[in-house]
Image: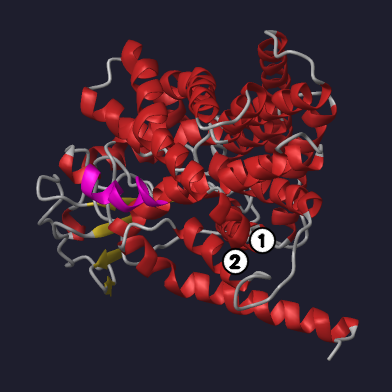
Amino acid sequence: MQLNEPMATAFLLTALGVLMGVCALFSRAAGRFGIPVALLFILLGVLGGSEGFGGIEFEDYGFTFRLGTVALVLILFDGGLNTPLAAVREGIRPAGVLATLGVMGTAAVMGVAAHLFGFEWKQAFLLGAIVSSTDAAAVFSVLRGSGLHLKRRVGVTLELESGLNDPMAVILTIGLTGALVSGVPIGWGILLEAASEMFVGAVLGVGIGYAGRYILKHVRLPAGGLYPVLTLAMAFVAFGLPTLFHGSGFLSVYLCAMLLGNEAIRYRSGLLRVHDAIAWLAQVGMFLMLGLLAFPSALVDVAWTGLGLGLVLAFVARPLVVVLCLLPFRFAWREALYVGWVGLRGAVPVILATFPVLAEAPGSLPIFNVVFFIVVVNALVPGATVGWVTRRLGLVSLAPPPPTAMLELTSTLLLNGELVPFYLDPASAVAGATIADLPLPGSAVVSLIVRGNDLVTPKGGTTLLPGDHVYIFCKAQELPLVQLLFGEQMQE
């Protein structure tokens, strides 16, 4: 029976809704088994595709590239909003080297390996460039599912690298695709072009970020729901404008969001929650779409090549390049080895693999299928061992556990005060004291105590216990004195 357009649309939405719901429901279980959530989305997309149980026919590479680009913009923008500048200052040098020289080195090693597996040189280096960048979402979804917290230096380096290395991979992929289509030899001009694009992207991203700060601090909108609309507009402009001027839109988006996220702006906590939800929706939709685009029958033909190159990437290319890049920064051997091992690939390589297909480059479809296979293998091999390797190398952080409930202020006004969370460890100066005995400065007040699964109403006779999460409301000028009592505030 042939479906009319409304019925076909209803069927498609129902099928996608079921797939997305299954992904969300099983994401926690997948993380506990060391399987990246992104991989679960892709595999369910494959099952729902034309050669799976769902029978959804989809083979639009152009639509995939455009929608995937939008999704990556949203994911990078959310990542930038949640990147503290203190972390940037601490890890920018090693992460910057990994995001540039590390990407080029990985592309080169993988290019040589791909040539040994039968690809001609230009196609081999194009394949290497496509799989050269990492995916923060895949890495930290596994860590969160395992209940692990990385030591700060290692975690900061991984997070910053994954947010900064996409531009170099994009530039290399576009340049090598052009060389493959035109037949022009690969030259050093591609490196000059990469430097130019990153410079333009950085300048415009910082400029748009500061402009966005000013707007969000001085313009009051009539409804809170309009602020995410405004920040989404900033994200799209931050990507589109540099791209029109031959700059790196991805780098621009990340830097713009970083500047916005580290400023006291209107509706800040609400914006963080909304963009977190949008980023997750973008990831789910993007990975499902990429799964629908894959054809298992075509993947079988490149299974051995994809498996071999996936293992080379996990065991040779990525660790070797990372260890060499981190030598000047005096990382301990186990830290450098860990950063090299936890370099999971996500949707970025698969989206980049659509570019040569759209450009009708020779050998583009076999490259796409091999890249898809490499992503799956790379997500499984390091991904399933992240928790074990973290504990084995002694890189688990002693950071306090997150609270079971969070308290926040959401306002479209710039308030003269903030709500600050603290964790009380046994060595805390105020552990065992009653609230009435606390020498809190000025207008500072204990607003809420989260004790396990209980919410404790703070009163004068309430005793603060080790393991409590305490929320203090205070003015900005009072925060240093509050920190002297309670220690360093938690990052929620």
Q: Position of residue 317 (x, y in %)?
A: 41, 27
Specify the principal SS of the magenta part.
helix
Q: Secondary structure at mark 1?
A: helix
Q: Residue at x 69, y 50 (%)?
A: 68
Q: Residue at x 41, y 20 (%)?
A: 94
Residue position marked by numbered label 2 in the rendering? 45
Q: How many marks?
A: 2
Which of the pair 68/484 is nearer the observer? Answer: 68
Mark 1 belongs to which amino acid?
Answer: Met
Q: Which residues lie in the magenta part?
A: 380-389
Residue position marked by numbered label 1 in the rendering? 289
- Residue 388: in magenta span: yes
Mark 2 belongs to which amino acid?
Answer: Gly
| Whether label 1 touches label 2, CB < 8 Å | yes
Residue 418 higher or lower than 46, as above or below: above
Residue 165 higher or lower than 11, as above or below: above
Q: Residues within 10 Å of mark 1 (few under 14, many from 20)?
A: many
Along the horizontal axis of the image, is 480 left or right of 364?
A: left
Which of the pair 253/36 is nearer the observer? Answer: 36
Labels 1 and 2: the sequence-earlier one: 2
Please indicate, yes or no, whether residue 446 appears anywhere in the rendered image.
no
